[in-house]
Image: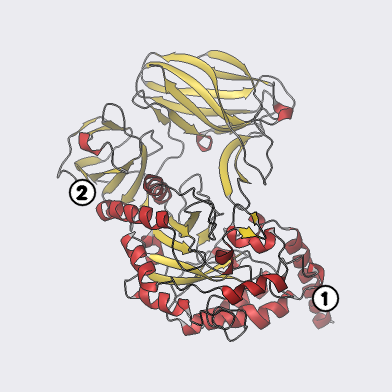
Amino acid sequence: MRSLSNKLLLAFFLSVSVLQANSQTMDEMWDSRSSDQEHPNIGWFKDAKFGMFIHWGLYSKLAGEWKGKRYYGSGEWIMNQARIPIAAYSKEAATFNPTNFDAEKWAQLAEDAGIKYMVITAKHHEGFSMFDSKVTDFDIVDATPYKKDPMKALAQSTRKRGIQFGFYYSQFQDWYEPNGGKNTWDFDESKKDYQQYYNNKAIPQLKELMTNYGPLGIVWFDTPGGLTKEQTNDFIKGLRKLQPNSLFSSRVGHGLGDYRDYGDSEIPATPIKGAWESIYTHNDSWGYIKHDMNFKTPREIVHLLAQVASKGGNLMLNVGPDGTGKIPEYSEKFLRETGKWLARNGESIYGSTYGLVPAQPWGVSTSKPGKQYLHVLNRPLDGKLVIPGFKANVKSVSILGGPAAVLFKKRGDVLEISLPAGDAANLGTVCVVNYAGKLADLDLNAPVSISSQFESNYVEAIFGKPQGKTTVRSLTYSHYYGDWKHTTCVTGMQDSSDAITFQLNVLNPGDYQIIAEYSCPEESAKLEGSLHVQDQQYLFRTLRTSEFVKSAPLMFIKHTLATTTFSTPGVYPVVLRPAGSGKELFKLKSLILKPVR
């Protein structure tokens, strides 16, 4: 009876997993949880900070077009977007011949860019294998005129440069296989046997990857599904025997990964302890799209890297080579510029932990023992960097790659640094503060600094203290298909008992405009709200922007609510709440304090 009950229970769980897999959208299939046990080989990953993701497959040949129609967003999803039948899609392999692929050039680009690890798609959701697989003929060696295994060459080229190498593998979604997840245009999803797919393709192919390509730093799983937690645990244990030193990403599912991967293009709002990673595209797509030219500039990459490192994580930035095996020109150019910055400033990134300096208008910080690295992303107009609450004894201050010493002075717990004039046009200046003693851990409740030496001072939603039904949470939505965005907002303010309070540390007295940056759907437009500061109430009426739906951009407006004068430096509470009751007032992204000039 017990055996029969267990079988019935397993059948029930599997049927539930089928229903869940059917209904989940792309973002709902991510898993950012990790196990509570630290992998013994996690140290290199924590120190690496900068990785390269490469999405390359049969979709790269299509380049975002199918039968004369252009598609935008995630190029690797074109088979799904265009509902291309397997019979038609598989024919594309006959002319896939990436003769421009050069493993040495790719690996050298990674080294020049300061990359410490590389992960490449061995098999994406399309089901096409970019390696010599004996499990299927739908791979780059058997199905194409190329007849070579590019993964072999790339594994060798990266390792000889000291770059950790790993494979991305879509373990559940496989649109080519009758029992693989998520092809609903060729197959009936409700009739699929996911376990058969795992046993016949996913697990055998993963064993090939973990046996034939040398030591792997990472196996990067994606969009888990079709397995219970117990089955996933057995799945992991079997693979670990092949490569015990390899790290598994959190998207293996059920919170069983070795480190946390956040959603596509997502950075957590506050520092996170433990090993984690943020993944971003260089333009708007993971796979190559020839009409996508929205490349992040070197400055944007550097600032993104600093933001991620300041919260204790790694940035893995994706490039999408084309169907011939060539990496886009601007990816090569801008990554090499990033590498030049890292050659000068890498000490502040590699091996660092999250910064101990609370939110400042000039930028962010990273940490090493006895050192705080101040990443100046916004230069103050007077060239004076102010760091309140720095209680440790400062021994010296310098600029990485710059002057041996920089002038500074300390007034109580306030540190003031005089920035060199010549660094104004740099991608990002980094000041190193060497100190004695111990700095307290980062205080997320510390007042946010406001200074007249910046054009605008942003006070992010995460630094507000909610009251009543008010919550602070991350909202996920997309621009193009699969081009995900995440914004932390104040939500749920529906009546006057709901509020959000921000504590502002005004460093320079003067006149300031107070601006609310928010999103407001039609149903919440024309509601009345109030702002309280310095015992004054300022009333306003909300302005419509857009509805909040996952499949469209979430639009924000910058609405000036008040002009006020801070006569003396000090800490001032600012409170926002609905003036009446009813619907949600708005979704608040930030307060902006802009000095009047």
- Label count reads 2
Do we see residue 227 in this rendering?
Answer: no
Furthest residue in direction left, as rendered: 404
* 109 sits left or right of 119 in the view: left
The amino acid marked with disc number 2 is: Gly
Residue receiving disc 2: 401
User: Toward the viewer: 319 or 249?
Assistant: 319
> Where does the image place residue 110, in percent across and percent down from the top left?
36, 64
Do we see residue 44 in this rendering?
Answer: yes
User: Toward the viewer: 583 or 390?
Assistant: 583
Q: Pointer 2: residues within 10 angstroms few (<14), some, or many (20+)?
A: few
The amino acid marked with disc number 1 is: Leu
Residue receiving disc 1: 8
The correct choice, above or below, for 352 with respect to 406 in the image is below
> Where does the image place residue 349, in percent across and percent down from the top left?
33, 53
* 101 sits left or right of 129 in the view: left
Helix, strand or loop at label 2? It is loop
The correct choice, above or below, for 300 with respect to 458 in the image is below
Q: Quadrant of the N terminus?
A: bottom right
Q: Which residue is painted at 61% across and 48% down in the image?
A: 480
Furthest residue in direction bottom, as rendered: 134
User: Toward the viewer: 510 or 188?
Assistant: 188
Q: Which quadrant holds residue 313?
A: bottom left
User: Toward the viewer: 358 or 455?
Assistant: 455
* 384 sits left or right of 98 in the view: left
> Where does the image place residue 458, in percent across and percent down from the top left?
46, 31
Q: Pointer 1: residues within 10 angstroms few (<14), some, or many (20+)?
A: few
